[in-house]
Image (cartoon, coloured by chain):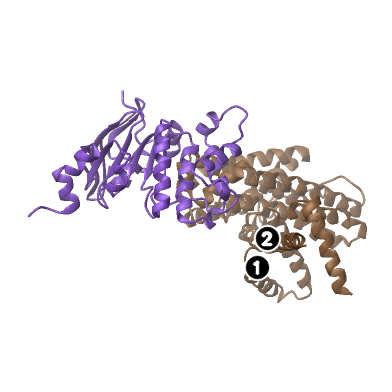
Chain colours: A purple, B brown
Amino acid sequence: MPLFEVEDLTKCFGGLTAVNKVSFQVNEGDIIGLIGPNGAGKTTLFNLITGFLKPDSGTVRFKGEEITGLEPHKIVNKGIARTFQVVRPFRHLPAIANVMVACLSPRAKKKLEWLKSPERKALDMLELVGLSEMMMEPAENLAHGDLKRLEMARALATEPELLLLDEPFSGLNPIETDFLTKSIQRLHLDGYTMIIVEHKLHALMKFVKRVIVLHYGEKIAEGSPKEVSQNEKVIEVYMGRKT
Amino acid sequence: MIRMVGTYLKRIYSAFATNVFDVPPRLLSLLFFMLLLFLPVAKLELHILRVITIAFIFSIFAASWDLLVGRAGQVSLGHALFFGIGAYLSAFLSKFHGFPLWATFPLSMLFCALVAVLLGFPCLRVTGPYLTLVTMAFPLILSVGLFALEPPFGGEGGIALPPRLLPIEDLYQQRIAEYYLILFLLFVSGVVLYKLANSKTGIVLVSILDNEMASKASGINITKYKLLAWAVSALFASLAGCLYAHYIQTTPPGIVLGLTTSFYPVIMTILGGIGTIYGPIVGAFTLWSLNEVFEFTEELRSILYIAIIIIFVLKWPKGIAKFVVEKLDELTEKRELNDKKK
């Protein structure tokens, strides 16, 4: 049984079909890239999965249980965490408190190790993403790259089984990109299942086993990065039609 | 000479701030309460005593508003609803049903928390300015309803109460006793609200204020936390209402449910410093003292004190209390730096 399954998911905004009958499956330990040009419906798909938007039709299943249209916090507590494309820190709170909020969710509390405080766990999460030196710094003083990592730490603190990363590389410099790539690879080794949205195929090539390509809300290709990059439809979408 | 004394005082303070009390707000609040504790020794006039006691009541009220708005970000302009319900219910129970006073307080507090939760369910579907407008309507509706009732229960004057919050023969003694009772309740509610605001629950409440979507994505049931903030806030607001009703011995709906009462905590909190809990207490005292200072000129009173509030808010937009605390922090830091240089 796949860990996570999306079937015929559809969402319309007025006359525009943002996501059109998208289906795919994710097995445990998979790391999947979700790519497509701007406006292809990647973020909308994420919002549908995580409950921030309600789908018009179709189902989302996680560990065999239907979670379509549940409230976002319930979905997080089932074990699906996400990051946002545009960072959403809690600006007034110091970095460690940002992560603490996630440590105080019911799921994180239940999974807290014996004799471990949420504070300690939040600090561990900050250490994992390399932000522990900034722990007392209010989030509004952090640089963009740090906020991206903070976002990641917050998602990890909810003890997810499936991690959805929405454009984790956007706005990062090469050094930060490198660091993040390594973190993601380490998380993959730790057994996290991940779906990563990115509009540049290049950044994902290194560590993604399977890629799903969206275009105008429809899934146009799925396969290994190599297969996908040779797929004619995909080339057409990215490069334009051959003449 | 004066400069010498000044530097000496600064030194004493920073030695205390770094070594004895780590947190300036805590030290300052402690000093403040000590001062209030010994104030009646000065044989104040009855009138002044009354003004200070009412400032205590409004401090509780404003602090409860601050928890709701400064922490959870639920801007309510109808906080008089809980004040008024508390006042009415407590007066009603003690006058017409013979409940002892100490029993009416927790009963009306719990009732208000219940009302807050029940109203919360429909209200929390809207956010931002819409929520503010919705909350504003409730106390007005209720006060119109109470106006329509026949005098013993409602009408313009509300329910008239016997002049006893505490049964003591001598008027001055009674006022002093009430002063201490209400000071004690202010201290307790201040500590409870401050502890709650700075607990883990408080962190979650601030996260809701900062970014609701991100709180949801962190697995937080924001409706639950918002309702909690509403309930706790209503609890203390209604305590203030109960005290007010028994202190002024009547419950005029135009006052206890009036717009002015809804706006008082807003002014006090912004004046003192939003999101701090101790700020509103400072604000309440500032507002009430200003009100007293301009006692002599009835016509210009409102204009004068509003002008001063505007100046305060422009000069210290973060609030008086926050400004003072930040300044003291700076002083301490400077001294620490100097010590390091040596």
Which of the two discs, 1 and 2, labels the residue nearer the N terminus? Answer: 1
Viewer-proximal residue, B108 or B273? B273
Q: Are marks 1 and 2 in contact (CB under 8 Å)?
A: yes
Question: What x and y, as percent, mark residue A67?
Answer: 36, 32
Quadrant of the snapshot with the N terminus of chain B: bottom right
Is B7 rendered above or below residue A38?
Answer: below
Task: Say yes or no: labels 1 and 2 on the same chain.
Answer: yes
User: Which chain does the residue under circle 1 lie in?
Assistant: B
Q: Is residue A30 visible?
A: yes
**In which quadrant of the rendered view does residue B276 lie?**
bottom right
The residue singled out by tag 1 in the image is: B316
Question: What x and y, as percent, mark residue A202?
Answer: 28, 47
Q: Which mark is residue A196?
A: none
| Secondary element type, mark 1 | loop
**Residue at the spot x=89%, y=56% of the render?**
B40
Question: What x and y, as percent, mark residue B147?
Answer: 62, 54
Q: How many marks?
A: 2
| Secondary element type, mark 2 | helix
Q: Is residue A220 left or right of residue A137?
A: left
**Residue at the spot x=21%, y=40% of the render?**
A226
Amino acid type of the residue that numbered disc 2 sits on in the rendered structure = Lys
**Residue at the spot x=88%, y=62% of the render?**
B45
Q: Is residue B148 left or right of residue A149?
A: right
Q: Is residue A232 left or right of residue B272?
A: left
The residue singled out by tag 2 in the image is: B322
Q: Is residue A220 visible?
A: no
Neighbourhood count class around disc 2 (C-alpha, 10 Å): few under 14, some 14–19, many 20 upward: many
Quadrant of the snapshot with the C terminus of chain B: bottom right
**Residue at the spot x=39%, y=38% of the render?**
A185
